[in-house]
Image: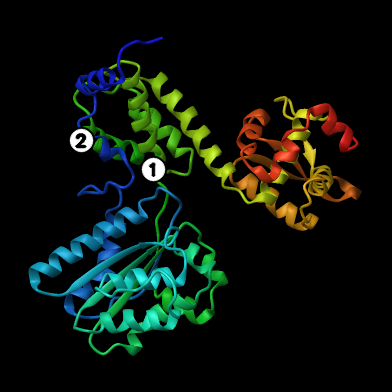
Amino acid sequence: MRNTPIAEVIEGLLESKSMFRNRDVLRSTYVPDYLPHRDREVEALLKILVVALRGDTPSNILIYGKTGTGKTAVTTHVGDELEKVGGKRGIPCRVLYMNCEVIDTQYRLLANLARNFGKRIPMTGWPTDQVYSEFRNAVDSKEQVVVIILDEIDKLTKKGDDVLYSLSRINSTLKRAKVSLVGISNDLTFTEFLDPRIRSSLGEEELVFPPYNADQLADILQQRAEMAFGNGALGGDVISLCAALAAREHGDARKALDLLRVSAELAERSGSMSVHEANVRKAQSRIESDRVEEVIVTLPTQSKLLLYGITMLDRATGSLRKPSGRTIMSTGEVYRIYKRMCGMIDLDALTQRRITELISELDMLGIVNATVVNRGRYGMTKEISLETPADHVHDMLITDTRLQPLMDLKLDSFQAQLGM
């Protein structure tokens, strides 16, 4: 066992040379002065919002695109530039950014908006109408243009769309100020569930951000790498490999940046001052594992129980297998096991139709693979198999106390209790 005092170990690590010059530029939250391959989107957004600097009301905008396509970076970058130019010209222009995945209720959104104008709103307790009135009065206290960026706007609509109706039509109640909404979403279909009146006023303009291809991702990584590392830190194939792997994930720039950063961190921890392909491969495996774990541990109880049943079926049966060696299960088999397990932990069972929907969600998350097949006169069904090793999933689910009675079951007793 190491006898060196921890303080000395810390000092040694701090004094050791790092390959990083600026680690933060490899994080998705960093917005550079120039965004490669997003000139068209920047120009389109500027043309819509620049009227704010003339004292006019910009249109409300909805921005769509898959994760990691630069939606938030472009929007916040354009917003920052508008504020700077407005300040130089003496034109009051405020850009407020709200992440609706964090600020996920109507009350919290309005309260946070009002606090940006100096209003002291309690975290709870006021009627929502009163909070809205405080915000509206604060905005209208002088002549100004306010641009409100609502990132992950689809998360907000799950708690009700009243606030979007009020905000999208707030200009009809203002006398001095003007407000524009910019909604950002990964879901191109979320407006289908909105009131038609909200849909028309919220989406006056729409922009769609396409995924990056491998060459574009390589350009983005090259720009960041020049800021993040010293000369000679990256092997010749590192950037192209990170870009190629991220391009397979729908052109996700966040994934590419994370992959490069984690690759460098792993290389540095091993005592190396350069990054090579092996570091990238190891980083990819670690990131995928961390992503799956985060998804699984945050699943609702019903989805966890369903997934646990699938893992136990995978471990307990081997009658039907793909060439890859994966166990194949039908929707009917999974539902039968799920219902019996509900009885074991005194949980109300969902309908088979709802369970089919949950299986599709797990498939979309990449945890299972569910393929629809036609069995002739027996109708349509789904062939289900695990995309993640069953033992790995079991270890993640074991932290849920609600499922604990099932975790204590051994495979043989599990098979006996479920009649397998």
Foreground residue, 82 or 138?
Answer: 138
Tell me the quarter of the image containing the C terminus: top right
Foreground residue, 191 or 160?
Answer: 160
Q: Is residue 196 above or below residue 213?
A: below
Q: Is residue 65 above or below residue 19?
A: below
Residue 245 lies, in percent from the top left, at 45, 33
Q: Is residue 408 above or below residue 139?
A: above
| Residue wearing tag 2 | 227
Residue 112 lies, in percent from the top left, at 34, 68
Q: Earlier in the sequence, mark 1 or mark 2?
A: 2
Which residue is at a point 76% across and 53% down the rendered structure image?
347
Tell me the quarter of the image containing the N terminus: top left
Residue 183 lies, in percent from the top left, at 40, 66
Would residue 49 be visible to someone looking at this image? yes
Label ID, residue 254: 1
Snapshot quadrant of residue 121? bottom left
Hey, what amino acid is under mark 2? Met
